[in-house]
Image: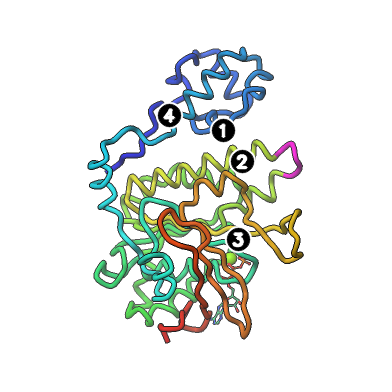
Amino acid sequence: MEYYKAKYQTLEDLPGVGPATATKLKEIGFRTVEAVATAAIRELVSAGIGETTAEKVISAARKSMAITFVRGDELVELRSNIRRLSTGCASLDRLLGGGIETQSITEFYGEFGTGKSQICQQLCLTAQLPVEQGGLDGGALYIDTENTFRPERIMQIAPRFNLDPDEVLKKIIFAEAYTSHHQVVLLENSDEVIKENDIRLIIVDSVTSHFRSEYLGREMLAPRQQELNKHLHKLIRLSRSFNTAVVVTNQVMAQPDAFFAKMVKPVGGHVMGHTSHTRVFLRKGRNNLRIAKLVVSPFLPEGETPLRITERGVEGDDDI
Ligand SMILES: Nc1ncnc2c1ncn2[C@@H]1O[C@H](COP(=O)(O)OP(=O)(O)OP(=O)(O)O)[C@@H](O)[C@H]1O
Ligand SMILES: [Mg+2]
């Protein structure tokens, strides 16, 4: 059931946008309603669009992005379709209030080697489990931007979940994205693949790396955020249309104004912050432990739990 439907689908649907304005918008890189919603008035003015029109168009695009009106009781019914995907680690599931939710984005961020990709690969297995065992009884779509997906690793972990190593890879659809544009296009065209393969989990590992390495310099920040925002909203729409879980990974950068040298923050700024509904920060602890910390959740308190990466995958204290 889809309840996240933008009011305006194309640029031309926006009040005040005729063919000439639509062309101007496209020329400066605003091709969708989602993109216009992130625009600044002066950007449109600089492309020859009048200030009043610019203001009106941006405001309509922003309103369009909001969830269409539903009654409270309908919302409860729609939300009752939300499923929870077990991570395979009981303690991490508890931290997440029962697992990873469908219909929204869950972000794992942290430094290199903290276990982001390991968790993603394990989720490709738990997603295949029956619902009674915490799974979603479906397949996974894995978009890899860093070439770190390892089918052998998935096969190695499979027995822990009583899954047949020779069967599990058949339920994982994999694509490597070579550029941010490629990553966007892959997702834009994924509806059919999701439907045909009964995909219940979408992974983008990592969601920001291409954007970060391609859009360099201050003047590229706005276009980068715009594209990233569009990409993340596509993910949200997919999650709601197909009732899938969406898991993305993200890197961190040093916090320039931090008092402590080791303080880091996730890449992607407020765009990433506003679209990831649940954010988990992973860091390295003593004795090769990893610590998962729930940083943002719409309904759960902050908290943290230790994890270990072993031959059996990612394990919490009570999984061993
Ligand atoms: N079979 C295994 N047994 C034990 N540990 C493993 C195994 N495979 C991978 N690891 C450990 O997992 C860690 C790498 O985790 P992962 O690749 O998930 O990091 P990441 O957070 O995705 O990092 P990056 O930011 O570089 O992508 C390494 O410390 C590695 O030793
Ligand atoms: Mg990784």
How is this picture coloured? rainbow
Residue 64 image label: 4
Q: Earlier in the sequence, mark 3 or mark 2?
A: 3
In the image, the segment drawn in magenta is: 216-220
Category of crowding for the residue at label 2, using alpha-carbon neighbours closer than 10 angstroms: few (below 14), some (14–19), many (at least 20): many
In three-dimensional space, the C-alpha distance between marks 3 and 1, rounded to whole angstroms, equals 27 Å
Q: Which amino acid is tagged 2?
A: Gln
Q: Quadrant of the C terminus?
A: bottom left
Q: Position of residue 311 (x, y in %)?
A: 50, 84
Q: Dot 3 corresponds to which residue?
A: 146
User: Does residue 133 appear in this view?
Assistant: yes
Residue at image x 43%, y 68%?
95
Do tag 1 and tag 2 residues touch (Cβ < 8 Å)?
Answer: yes
Residue at image x 51%, y 24%?
59
**Left or right, residue 41 beside residue 165:** right
Residue 225 image label: 2
In three-dimensional space, the C-alpha distance between marks 3 and 4, rounded to whole angstroms, equals 34 Å
Q: Main secondary structure of the magenta part?
A: helix
